[in-house]
Image (cartoon, helix red, strand yellow):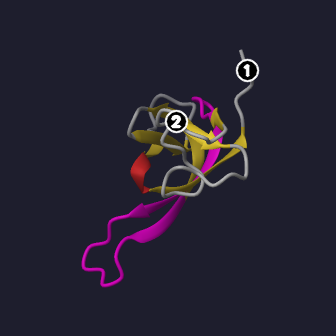
Amino acid sequence: MSVITESETPCNRTPSYCCQHPDCPCETEEVVIGDIVQIDFLDHAQDSEDGPILCTVYGCVIDHGAHYITVASWQTHIDDFEDTTFTIVTSCITSLVVLKQQPSS
């Protein structure tokens, strides 16, 4: 997943996410597992007369693929408890901000 780092108009409909098509003009930076992020995204809404709902999740990136990103908003350090995670389809993302980058290895 790539986040736009310059103020150029992104190639995708969303303001902060780049689709990475060939010859893309966006200057981007890869989001990596361990980054702390803020993601604004559109979520489905049952019986809504106004379309999808804009939502925000904050957390640690724990997985990502070509069409999704998974963020843990609550992580525990004890095996008996489960993390709270959100998997978001990238085409629904309207903004992705890296709040704290994972240090380079």
Within the image, what quadrant is residue 85 found in?
A: top left
User: In percent of the image, x 41 and y 41: which residue is there?
Assistant: 68
- Image coordinates for residue 82, horizontal then vertical, percent: 44, 38
Q: Residue furthest left?
A: 47
The answer to whether residue 15 of the structure is visible from this angle is yes
Q: Is residue 15 left or right of residue 101?
A: left
Give the Cα distance between marks 1 and 2: 16 Å
User: In percent of the image, x 59 and y 29: which residue is there?
Assistant: 32
- Image coordinates for residue 46, horizontal then vertical, percent: 26, 73
Q: In this view, does 101 lie to the left or right of 91?
A: right
The answer to whether residue 89 of the structure is visible from this angle is no
Q: In this view, does 57 lie to the left or right of 51?
A: right
Can residue 10 be found in the magenta stretch? no
- Image coordinates for residue 45, horizontal then vertical, percent: 32, 71
Query: Are the residues at dot 1 and dot 2 in contact (C-beta closer than 8 Å)?
Result: no
The residues colored magenta run: 30-56
Can residue 45 be found in the magenta stretch? yes
Q: What element carries label 2?
A: loop
Q: Which of marks 1 and 2 is nearer the N terminus?
A: 2
What's the residue type where badge 2 is placed? Met
Q: Which mark is residue 35?
A: none
User: In percent of the image, x 50 and y 37: which residue is there?
Assistant: 20
- For residue 92, above or below residue 64: below
- For residue 70, above or below residue 93: above
Q: What element carries label 1?
A: loop
Number of residues whose C-alpha sits closer than 10 Å to that of mark 2, classed few (under 14), some (14–19) or many (20 or more): some
Look at mark 2 in the image and give the residue it sits on.
1
- Image coordinates for residue 90, horizontal then vertical, percent: 43, 47
Q: Residue furthest top?
A: 105
Look at mark 1 in the image and give the residue it sits on.
104
